[in-house]
Image (spheres, helix red, strand yellow):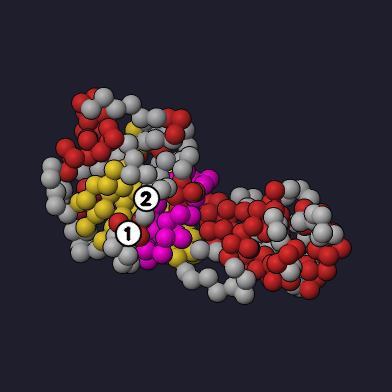
């Protein structure tokens, strides 16, 4: 087995390269070999698989992926970490390090447009936009990520869960999301103030009768004023509350419903009942 990074190795690398973790960005490095091996196992990664790793940092998870024989495309935005990672990998031909922002780079192009897995230990402040972008890239057959517990639970939440919100619906429109395992804060350096979870996401095609983007815009409008009933939250010049009520009733929904009471299928049915000219921003 490969020698994976522990607390002492990570501290040494940080000192050697003059790197200070940015707590404001939620940046922490994994220092528990059992945790990275668990991520790899839950991701179902095996020898010969192509894996895109977002935010490899010092290479804790990268080494675990190489341990099972995966080919890794590691996307890192921080120049200092790119230099440190090069030393950790010591010219390993099975890893391609790309110095780029995962929110801007062509992720599908990095894996040659073929199906691949994505794994990541995501910084808390960028986790949701990164996951949504990766899911829309069309290049990955599965995503397995470590993220702050509340964020991960929100992605997987359904109607009735206190964490259920617009992001839950947007993720559901793109993938089946499931919290796979808890991760203690003690697995990271510096130790964050919250625990984490490992989340698995399986992308699935959109099969709704209206565009996914239109449903997403409707969801945003509904949750922008989530304390209001949808008849009022969705109304605007040219779209009276009574028309929203009629659309809700026509979709088989309660005319007095609020945003958090509707599942993805309900939002799709509602969007189909509202004429395109009725939609938010039209």
Residue name at image x 42 percent, y 30 percent: 23
| In the image, residue 245 above or below residue 221 | below
Rendered image: mark on residue 109 = 1
What range is drawn magenta here?
132-152
With 255 as the anchor, is 88 left or right in this view? left
Q: Are marks 1 and 2 in contact (CB under 8 Å)?
A: yes
Instruction: Answer whether residue 271 is magenta in the image.
Output: no
Secondary structure at numbered mark 2: loop
Which quarter of the figure has residue 234? bottom right
Query: How would you rate the neighbour count of disc 2 (Cα within 10 Å): few for under 14, some for 14-19, many for 20 or more?
Result: few
How far, Cα to Cα, is label 1 from label 2? 9 Å
Left or right for 249, reference 148: right
**Mark carried by residue 105:** 2
Above-or-below relation of 155 to 272? above
| Rendering coords of residue 231 (x, y %) | 81, 58
The quadrant of the image that shows the C terminus is: bottom right
At x 77%, y 53%, the residue is 233
Q: Residue furthest right?
A: 242
Q: Where is residue 235 drawn, in percent x and y? A: 80, 56
Nearer to me, 218 or 68? 218
């Amino acid at each position: 087995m490969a020698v994976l990074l522990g607390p002492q190795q990570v501290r040494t690398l940080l000192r050697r390269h003059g790197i200070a973790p940015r707590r404001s960005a939620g940046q922490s490095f994994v220092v528990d070999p059992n945790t990275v091996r668990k991520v790899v196992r839950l991701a179902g990664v095996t020898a010969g698989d192509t894996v895109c790793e977002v935010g490899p940092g010092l290479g804790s998870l990268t080494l675990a992926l190489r341990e099972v024989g995966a080919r890794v495309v590691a996307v890192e935005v921080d120049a200092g970490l790119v230099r440190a990672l090069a030393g950790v990998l010591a010219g390993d031909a099975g890893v391609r390090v790309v110095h780029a922002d995962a929110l801007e780079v062509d992720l599908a192009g990095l894996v040659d447009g073929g199906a691949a897995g994505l794994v990541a230990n995501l910084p808390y402040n960028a986790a949701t936009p990164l996951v949504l972008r990766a899911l829309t890239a069309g290049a990955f057959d599965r995503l397995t990520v470590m993220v702050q517990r509340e964020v991960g639970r929100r992605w997987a939440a359904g109607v009735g869960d206190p964490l259920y919100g617009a992001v839950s619906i947007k993720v559901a429109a793109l993938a089946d999301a499931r919290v796979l395992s808890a991760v203690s804060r003690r697995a990271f350096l510096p130790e964050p103030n919250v625990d984490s979870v490992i989340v698995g996401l399986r992308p699935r095609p959109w099969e709704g009768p209206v565009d996914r983007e239109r449903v997403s815009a409707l969801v945003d409008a509904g949750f922008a004023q989530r304390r209001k009933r949808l008849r009022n939250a969705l109304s605007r010049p040219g779209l009276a509350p009574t028309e929203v009520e009629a659309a809700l009733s026509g979709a088989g929904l309660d005319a007095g419903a609020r945003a958090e009471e509707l599942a993805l299928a309900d939002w799709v049915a509602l969007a189909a009942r509202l004429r395109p000219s009725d939609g938010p921003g039209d």
